[in-house]
Amino acid sequence: MINAPRTSVVLFTRDLRVHDNPALHHATQEGQVVPLFVLDPKILKGSYNRPNRAKFLAESLADLAAALEKRGAGLVVRRGEVAAEVAELVQTVKASAVHMAGDASGFSHRREDALREALDELDCELHVHDDSLFVVPPGQITAVGKTHMSVFSPYHRKWEKEPRRTPLSPPRKLALPAGIETGKVPTANEISSGETAPHMSAGGETAGRKLFRTWLEQRAEGYADDHDDMAGDRTSRISPYLHFGCLSPLEVVTKAWDMAPAFTRQMAWRDFHAQVLAANPKSTQVDLRPRNDRWRRGKDAEREFKAWKEGRTGWPLVDACMRQLVDEGWMHNRGRLVVGHFLCKTLYLDWRWGAQFFVDHLIDGDTANNTMNWQWVAGTGTDSRFNRILSVSSQAERYDPNGDFVRRYVPELSDVPGAKVHAPWKLPTDVRKQLNYPEPIVDVREGNERFLAARGKR
Ligand SMILES: Cc1cc2nc3c(=O)[nH]c(=O)nc-3n(C[C@H](O)[C@H](O)[C@H](O)COP(=O)(O)OP(=O)(O)OC[C@H]3O[C@@H](n4cnc5c(N)ncnc54)[C@H](O)[C@@H]3O)c2cc1C
């Protein structure tokens, strides 16, 4: 008697690639593979489903489907509750295993539990690959008696020493079992409707690999010196591709390891935040280290928040960064730090307000990285110097010394030369009047003192 080939379902979540994809690779080793993506109504209705990410997701799914088709199989797309959809497909194709990537959020853990329960009943194995979305997965590096580490530097020292596996090659050939309907890859509008950023990057593994290759060849070596040069725009910009798993973090780190240690250190922050979130799932909303903050509320607070969102605070560097966010669905890391400190410390507004606005626009908007960075900025997270304030003027002087970054995003100020662009209120009154640019909404020094007083520092 000839044994029927073993069939596995590969459930894609945010690992939308064929290169170095442990779930796809291991399932392929075992026999026939059914690649599946489920549009989950819980995600579709949630606060993370926003037009920019929907567009990037749709493009990434189309690219993945094409890569799978090229290898002989399509991407099966279903819409519905994940455990139920997977269970139904498992029964249809008589699969004996499901492979998927392990993730860090409370939502992903609940999804995994529900799936395990449904598959147990069908006597089908669930293989969760924790090395897909992270270089070092949550739970692998721990402090004594803890499930994670809460200070970055010692975490990073251990992270660097962890053994790393070799990136996996993509499967050469795939074949769907006969009679499987693949379904249609959704368009962006079928995921979320609304306007997208005019200048956002294109989604997908093909675009991500090309971007990373070019950056590696042309910019990786200078990263340590120039990653904070805002006008130079020399960081990799791969964060959206990492968020959707179009790029493998392990492959990225492996390729950059010798050339750009400062870059791989940033990649360690990504794993660090994931393991803090995995150990503290409620920290998406709740302060990790409460500081008894009484964030400002009321009309003035709302007016200032509106100005911040619109890039009309009268502080050019803040406004340039906020306009970059809306224009590109992305913001430079230095910019995120500047506008975050300005919101939480200078204006003393709740980090959750800022985090949600970022999620509304960022293509890389990510539960772990967004929340944990916002908590870090607000001083309620893992920053041990939790009352530190990045002053907008000194940040402008250091990281946009000639004002080129501001002029690129704030056209009202495009004729103001050099560093003068950072302080338009110092220009002669008649010049100022013609600019149509707002007066500062806050005296930064007073704002920062208010924050320190609230934290009991003065
Ligand atoms: C308030 C705030 C909110 C943020 N929200 C997000 C978010 O939602 N999603 C997100 O991916 N990053 C977030 N970051 C981190 C960081 O700003 C972006 O990852 C980075 O700007 C992406 O650009 P890049 O790919 O060119 O980075 P590069 O400088 O080229 O770095 C390479 C990669 O390292 C990782 N990385 C870099 N810095 C950090 C960091 N501080 N924390 C975690 N990972 C990091 C990213 O995956 C990044 O793609 C946030 C930072 C702040 C201060």
Image: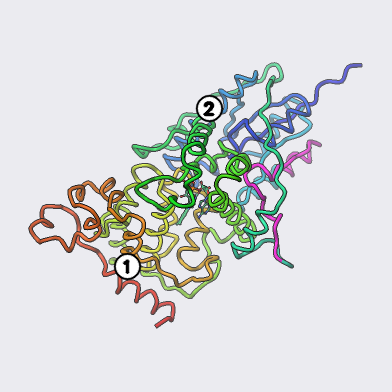
Percent position of residue 386, x then y: 49, 71
Q: Within the image, what quadrant is residue 247 found in?
A: top right
* Badge 2 element: helix
Query: Depth check: 236 or 369 in front?
Result: 236
- Span shown in magenta: 116-143
In space, the residues marked 2 and 1 are separated at their CA atoms by 46 Å
Q: Residue furthest right?
A: 1
**Which residue is tagged 2?**
63
Residue 55 located left or right of residue 407: right
Q: Is residue 296 left or right of residue 125?
A: left
Residue occupying the point 47% across, 38% down: 218
Of circles 2 and 1, which is in front?
2
Residue that extends furthest to the bottom in the rendered view of this protein: 458
Task: Name the N-terminal-most of marks 2 and 1.
Answer: 2
Q: Position of residue 427 (x, y in %)?
A: 14, 60
Residue 181 lies in the magenta stretch: no
Amino acid, disc 1:
Gly
State which quadrant residue 18 falls in. top right
Taking the view exactly as shown, the residue that stands out farthest to the left is: 430
User: Would residue 77 be found to the left or right of residue 314 on screen?
Assistant: right
Q: Which mark is residue 438?
A: none
**Amino acid type, residue under disc 2 in the picture:** Asp
Q: Position of residue 171 (x, y in %)?
A: 68, 26
Q: How is the image coloured?
A: rainbow
The tag on residue 298 is: 1
Residue 1 is situated, as x and y percent measured from the top left of the image, at 92, 16
Q: Main secondary structure of the magenta part?
A: loop
Q: Which quadrant holds the C terminus?
A: bottom left
**Placement of 85 over or under 227, stated as above or below:** above
